[in-house]
Amino acid sequence: MVSNRDPGIQLDSASLSRKQVWTMTVTRYRFSVSNRLVRTRVIVNTGDTIQTLATGIVGFGGGVLGWFVPALTADGDPVTAPPDYPAPALRKNSLICQIAGRWFQGGRNTSFTSPVDGELMLAPNDRYPADNNGFWDVTIVHTRPDVPTIGTTPHLSVSSLEFVQVTQNRAGDVPMIAGKRTVLRIFLSSGLGATVDVGYGPGLLGPVDGQLSVRSPTGSATLTFAGGLARAPGTHRRDNASHSIQIELPLGLLRGSVQVDVTATVRGHAPAESGFAARASRTVPFVSNRTETVLPILLTNPVGGRPAPTLSQYTTALRGAMTMMPIVATGVVVNPPDTISSAPANFTIPTMWTALLARLATTIWFLPATPHTGIRTAVVDAPEGTMGGIGTSIPWGTFISRVDFLSSGSAQFGFETFAHEWSHAYGQLHANFCGAPWPYDDRLLSTTQETGFDVAAGMIMPSTTFELMSYCTSSSRWPSVATYQTAVNALR
Amino acid sequence: MYAVQLNPDDWGPAQLTLAGTISADGGVFGLGFALCRTATAQPVEDGDLKWLAVDLLGADKAIRSTTLVPALPICAFPDPDSKPSEQVAFLIDSLIPLVDDVQAMVVRDEDRVYLHRIFVSDPPVIDALSAKSQGGDAYVVSWSAYHPAGVDVEHIVMVSQDDGATWRPTTLPIGETSIAVNVAPASGVKTLLFGVVTTDGLNTVFVRAEPVEAMPVPPQLGILTPGPGTVRSPLTLIAITTEPSQLPSIRTRWTSSTDGEIAQGMSTVGALSPGKHTISVSLVDDSGKPVASDSVAVVVE
């Protein structure tokens, strides 16, 4: 139903001024909409205006014996859609627009102002779009006011609710893994102009207190927050932790369909006071992964004169890497470890890493005494090594990762190395930066491009963080959405 | 459980090489190999070498052909002098039904033969196998081996902690005939049996050494969760151990530096008071004495 990307055509972009006070940017895009959800990659901020100008006819299937098949403009039928349509409150068989999970009415010439941040998506409001034919030629006019149209009067709102476990994009469609620690980021908008100061700084409003209700099939809980600050619309930066309120959600509730309801009020004002209170809700599915099995291989390093890593070193590396992977500890089956000599491997010779990997990956164990299934996860203490690790998905997931980083004050680098090689075991290729060898994943850049979150550390991982699959190691690395999604897909 | 590799010393980006695992047991070949090729005359084209065939040959014809595909190319040579586009490697692992009267194996693609291995009927010979303790968990296993037909052979050193009922590997396939290995006997194990599997690719022999006294080594324990950092109570507690059998939960004890004992068992749930804790897990022997432990520092919110 969701296409990876529909290459909409950007028609033009212009900055306009009005009354010598406000400026705005208007950008036009063009898309075809027929039988599926169209991702536009157009990022909409709260307060932006979206106008749809659509021509063409879409034929909707479902007629009787081929007769009376409706063929409609983007305005659709003049009735609201049935409950099992994507947007029951909007016109049946019409063009509809989605931002951050909320639907808005589109049409031949329709406009709306977005109350939320997110990627714009387009679709026909149809229960079974796959049998449609023809298409609507849709021009999107995206108007972004550089100065908010709301000036001096506070108008508190929740501009977006973002769930994040490891990484998240602006559209909020990175899958949530059941039972994995999750943070909800609450972005509050003040409704003030960016230069308007009502006592808390330009564009700011606060302190904002609130309540968060979490409901799922496993129960419910109510949490509170206090002292937040709302920012001028359009000024939120996801990389900045102070631009949102971060609340870790109760772990036991993170299964199935999880709904959060947020109420926020500027301290000293009544919840019913217009402009000083806001509410928002969001429901997100938390999906269970398959169980992952790993085979620990503790490699001795006779040539380098090092014993096999301890089981504690292995689990330290494994759980450190798990913070970057779509997996939870209860979803990992750890087979009994093997302690195996790496001889004659000499870790100062790069090709010996390859040779050892090949041996580990291709050795077949017939009828062993203990289970030898799962990803072959070898660790070695090799401070003399010329590589940090090496991994492959062929013929099955196998990798080697050094653990000497853990005790040399570079524990985080050790976790990143383990996660990097683990990602190779799922088929993820390198980011072509900082000397990483071919083959490459052309989707990856040197940095993650999207904001992540290290939940255990309670720390934002900015979009400028180096990509996990790059060799850029002068500071921390973290998975991009694409790298993370590779692991998500492998674990389905 | 037999597996050996062929030509392990031929690795290197400068030549067309094949290292393989070929073994026979119970009517199947276990075939695992890595094919690494460096194109020196012309760049490797994308999609080059899309498949490989393994032919088992009888006296004068192929009696079974198995195609191994698709194998995605990987490049795992970080040699700074090499050009990435010039390297291709394939790792393949498969089980192939063994047929009677097989006399040779050919690994090929459409127009190239990468391996032509002639099997002989005589098995390799192993003798003078011995195992000695070197103190702690170290043992040296030595043997001599030869093949009547002069064929290269490879070995895996195995160990049994239950008088030969089950075996586990202690090495990958090697060409050497003496190696130091590390074995941590499980609690209560008095003797170890070492054995060597040697094969020429088709004919496999397995020889056991005389039992050697097992030197007691403390088991190991590692905490899988929680990790360090902030946590919420109650929290899941999971540890793994080198002890091979299921342990009574009473032998695994979880304690907090602040709250004392909080749980028992390898996988359990514990409740903690807010604040800083060092969570420790201990494996205790029958007398309640700790024999292994691991710990992690957390802050309970």
Image: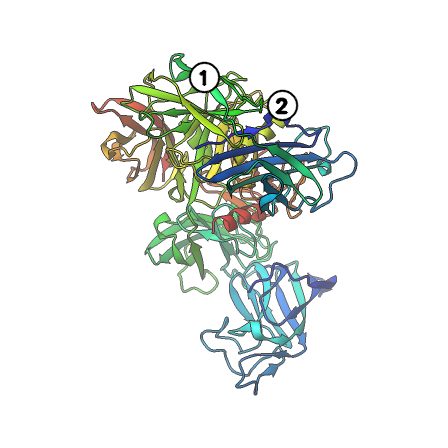
Residue type, mark 2 in image: Ile
Q: Quadrant of residue A120?
A: bottom right
Q: Residues within 10 Å of mark 1 (few under 14, many from 20)?
A: few
- Figure quadrant of the N terminus of chain A: bottom right
Q: Position of residue A340 (x, y in %)?
A: 46, 25
Query: In this orientation, which residue lies closer to the viewer: A147 or A331?
Result: A331
Looking at the picture, tell me which residue is in the foreground, A223 or B83. Answer: B83
Rendered location of residue B19, percent (x, y): 60, 31
Q: Quadrant of residue B229?
A: top left
Q: Are labels 1 and 2 assigned to the same chain?
A: no
Q: Nearer the viewer, mark 1 or mark 2?
A: 1
Residue sitting farthest toward the right: B41
Residue at image mark 2: A349
Residue identified by numbered label 1 = B127
Does residue A56 lie above or below A37 as drawn?
A: below
- Disc 2 secondary structure class: loop
Under mark 1, the amino acid is: Asp
Residue A330 visible here: yes
- From the viewer's perspective, tell me whether residue A303 is left or right of residue B296: right
- Pick whichever, A294 or A271, lies toward us: A294
Q: Residue at x 37, y 51 (%)?
A: A224
Q: Residue furthest left?
A: B287
Chain letter behind tag 2:
A
